[in-house]
Image (cartoon, grey):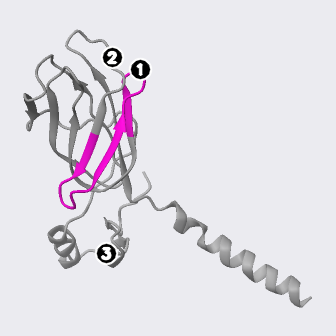
Amino acid sequence: MRNWLRRQVWIWALSACLPLFAQEFRAVITGVVKDAQGAVVPAVPIEAQNLATNDISRTTTNETGYYAFPVLPIGTYRVTAAPAGFKKTVRDNLELRVGDQVQQDFRLEIGAVSEVITVTAGTDLLQTLASDKGQVVGEALRARSLQSPTKVLIFGNPNAGTPLMVAPASQSIYR
């Protein structure tokens, strides 16, 4: 009887903690590397550098020109493609937020290794892999929402580094 009760307590405790493992705090960068004629380029070294921490993640394109960084911490990145025989191509200030799945394709130009193409302004990031929307609430918006006379529901723990979701109590957050 005593072992049965102990086992039941452990099962209950573990099942209560399971939702904690589902919290996502990372982002994903994927893409395809092509040459100027549109043909895929295999075996291209790709680097993703976190500009805040200078951590560098490296990968290589596969035979279809596809690359992926599946588990990047959130932050601002510089993504670089530097194949032999082509100009080095850089995508700067690529901002990743929680749960982002960003596709960043490269079109390479033939040239010397010393030549660099840096793209600093481009189109807005398009998330082609996810259909959900998210928003990180800043300190000013959270303070302004708390000062309003309406009731406000706040989800998240700012001390744990998770983003907050703020919604008026009269508005359903489940649409």
Q: Residues within 10 Å of mark 2 (few under 14, many from 20)?
A: some
**Dot 3 amino acid type:** Pro
Cα–Cα span, label 2 and label 1: 6 Å
The residue positioned 75% from the left and 83% from the top of the image is: 9
Q: Residue at x 30, y 12 (%)?
A: 39
Give the CA distance from mark 3 to mark 2.
Answer: 43 Å
Residue 57 placement (x, y as % from top left): 32, 48
Q: Are marks 2 and 1 in contact (CB under 8 Å)?
A: yes
Q: Which residue is mark 2?
A: 40
76 falls in the magenta region? no
Is 78 displayed left or right of 151 in the figure?
left
Residue tagged by mark 3?
A: 158
Q: Nearer the viewer, residue 175 or 84?
A: 84
Q: Is residue 25 above or below residue 125?
A: below
Q: Which residue is mark 1?
A: 64
> How many neighbours does mark 3 have within 10 angstroms: few (below 14), some (14-19), or many (20 or more)?
few
For the point 9% across and 31% down, the residue is 116
The first of marks 3 and 2 along the sequence is: 2
Q: In the displayed structure, would residue 39 be above or below residue 64?
A: above
The magenta span reads: 47-68
